[in-house]
């Protein structure tokens, strides 16, 4: 048990980070850095939490060791014919985030899911690619950091998820958030 | 000296007596200290209130400490600063320092909560004469280096990225770090698009990233890339702000608003105790705290003392350094 875990642990860590880096490599601000004077905000203002617990690799001695073995009986009982049915063969996502002047951010998310069969009352679902667009503006509300955002989901139109009758169409939203 | 602290009517009367007795009066009794705050939000008010409380508690005969939002100066209320009304002007934050630097002020000016790079740009003239000084928000680089030595013993190869704000200090830093036995990989980042390649290139050659205070490099937009890339390379980040530690840097030494207030109050009380109204030279924070991201430390397999122990160890070496 232990030697296998030790070999897999670094791969697991790199896997998580590769995903995160894909997302983060688009997050830089405008190409040329502003030549502004430093202020106390550079020292005091809050930053997004980057290395959260879920992103950090757990040292092996602290791992709880909870392992679920999916065996032939369990797969048969679930109604799947073969293991690949249980999930899509391919899936991909690429969030593109661009900071704009005056505390605006624009982001475009592209999500692809290959054909798959959902468990339970789900159906065999064809592949889909969907696009989400979001524009956000950060501002100060008194001493509070706040953000107003507007977005459109499923820009490219309807797609089907989970079962044949579950059709998700284009929708728009407006959100307001404040940090306490 | 006591003449300076009595009520306006009293001072006029006392002045009359002095004149009648032919005694020379060095300055008309100025009774107030202005604390000009950049914003009216919590950190600034905490500093202004802290200074007022500590000065007035310690020395009941000390002058009145008045908090003034900088927007009033921007709005044109500046004439009073040309008079003797304020004996000392304390600015809190960069905006207040910028505004006060541009108006005519008779009293000495003490800038607080100010990055060293900004103060040195503002005070190209008039510093060192006791009329203009600062308590920096930055820690001395030696203190941050000693923190690195304590939390990462045995790691001697460090990376430091510098940009337009920190360029002035990179040579000083390299000299200091080399003298302490570190080998330094220092790389300039002059465009945001260079950050990724520069990070990748330099992190492969060192054991940890030493963050020099520079908002062109460490900001909301770049922190994610910096922390993820360095974590991916197994290189911890020694930062200059508690916010960075919360975000995922390994450790930082920093000064809180309450500590800024305490240091400022002590400088003011010393001016009155000395009876000589000449400001000391610009100085780094006397009071500071240490913060460690324990989850990041655990994930990197590092064993680090608790905060209290770290503070004690760093205080000892900081005293030796100073």
Image (tube, coloured by chain):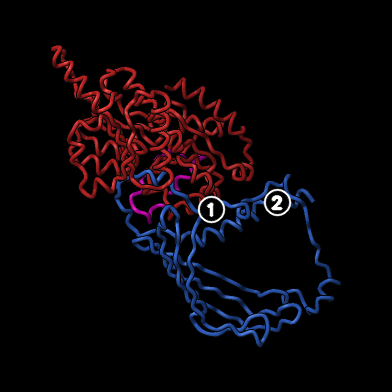
User: Which of B4 and A41 lies nearest the eye of the viewer?
Assistant: B4
According to the image, label 2 marks what residue?
A: A7
Mark 1, Cα crowd under 10 Å, few <14 / some 14-19 / many 20+, is: many
Q: Quadrant of residue B234?
A: top right
Q: Is residue B121 left or right of residue B112?
A: left
According to the image, label 1 marks what residue?
A: A50
Residue B197 appears in the picture as rendered: no
Instruction: Name the chain letter of the residue that bears numbered label 2.
Output: A
User: Which chain can be seen in blue?
Assistant: A
Q: Is residue B68 left or right of residue B300?
A: left
Quarter occupied by the N terminus of chain B: top left
Q: Residue drawn 20% across and 42% down?
A: B78
User: Which chain can be seen in red?
Assistant: B
Quarter occupied by the C terminus of chain B: top left
Asked which secondary structure carries label 2, the reply is: helix
Asked which secondary structure carries label 1, the reply is: loop
Residue B103 appears in the picture as rendered: yes
Q: Residue drawn 51% across and 40% down?
A: B208
Specify the farthest residue to the right.
Answer: A73
Quick check: do tags 1 and 2 share a chain?
yes
Q: Position of residue A6 (x, y in %)?
A: 71, 49
């Amino acid at each position: 048990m232990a030697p296998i875990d030790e070999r897999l642990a670094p791969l697991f860590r790199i896997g998580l980070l590769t995903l995160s880096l894909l997302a983060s490599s688009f997050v830089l601000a405008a190409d040329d850095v502003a030549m502004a004077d430093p202020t106390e905000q550079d020292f005091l203002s809050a930053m997004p939490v980057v290395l959260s617990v879920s992103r950090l690799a757990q040292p092996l001695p602290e791992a709880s060791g909870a392992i679920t073995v999916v065996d032939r009986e369990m797969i048969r009982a679930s109604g799947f014919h073969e293991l690949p049915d249980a999930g899509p063969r391919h899936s991909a996502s690429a969030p593109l985030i661009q900071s704009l002047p005056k505390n605006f951010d624009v982001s475009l998310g592209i999500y692809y899911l290959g054909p798959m069969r959902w468990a339970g009352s789900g159906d065999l679902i064809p592949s889909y690619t969907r696009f989400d667009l979001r524009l956000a503006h950060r501002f100060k509300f008194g001493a509070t950091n706040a953000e107003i955002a507007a977005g459109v989901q499923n820009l490219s139109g309807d797609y089907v998820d989970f079962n044949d009758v579950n059709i998700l169409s284009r929708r728009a939203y407006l959100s307001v958030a404040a940090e306490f | 000296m006591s003449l300076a602290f009595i009520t306006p009517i009293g001072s006029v009367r006392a002045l009359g007596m002095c004149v009648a007795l032919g005694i020379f009066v060095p300055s008309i009794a100025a009774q107030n200290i202005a604390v000009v705050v950049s914003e009216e939000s919590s950190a600034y008010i905490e500093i202004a209130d802290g200074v007022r409380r500590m000065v007035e508690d310690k020395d009941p005969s000390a002058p009145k400490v008045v908090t003034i939002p900088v927007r009033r100066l921007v709005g044109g209320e500046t004439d009073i600063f040309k008079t003797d009304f304020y004996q000392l002007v304390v600015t809190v934050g960069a905006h207040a320092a910028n505004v006060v630097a541009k108006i005519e002020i008779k009293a000495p000016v003490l800038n607080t909560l100010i990055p060293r790079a900004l103060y040195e740009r503002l005070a190209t003239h008039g510093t060192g004469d006791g009329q203009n000084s600062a308590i920096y928000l930055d820690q001395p680089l030696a203190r941050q280096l000693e923190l690195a030595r304590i939390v990462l013993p045995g790691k001697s190869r460090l990376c430091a990225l510098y940009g337009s704000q920190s360029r002035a200090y990179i040579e000083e830093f390299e000299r200091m770090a080399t003298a302490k036995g570190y080998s330094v990989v220092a790389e300039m980042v002059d465009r945001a698009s260079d950050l990724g390649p520069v990070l990748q290139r330099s992190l492969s050659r060192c054991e940890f990233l030493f963050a020099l205070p520079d908002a062109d490099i460490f900001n909301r937009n770049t922190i994610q890339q910096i922390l993820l890339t360095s974590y991916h390379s197994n290189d911890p980040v020694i930062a200059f702000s508690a916010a960075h530690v919360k975000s995922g840097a390994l450790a930082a030494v920093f000064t809180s608003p309450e500590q800024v207030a305490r240091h400022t109050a002590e400088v003011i009380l010393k001016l009155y105790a000395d009876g000589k109204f000449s400001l000391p030279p610009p100085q780094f924070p006397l009071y500071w705290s240490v913060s460690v991201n324990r989850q990041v430390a655990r994930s990197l397999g590092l064993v680090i003392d608790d905060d209290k122990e770290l503070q004690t160890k760093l205080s000892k070496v900081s005293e030796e350094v100073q």
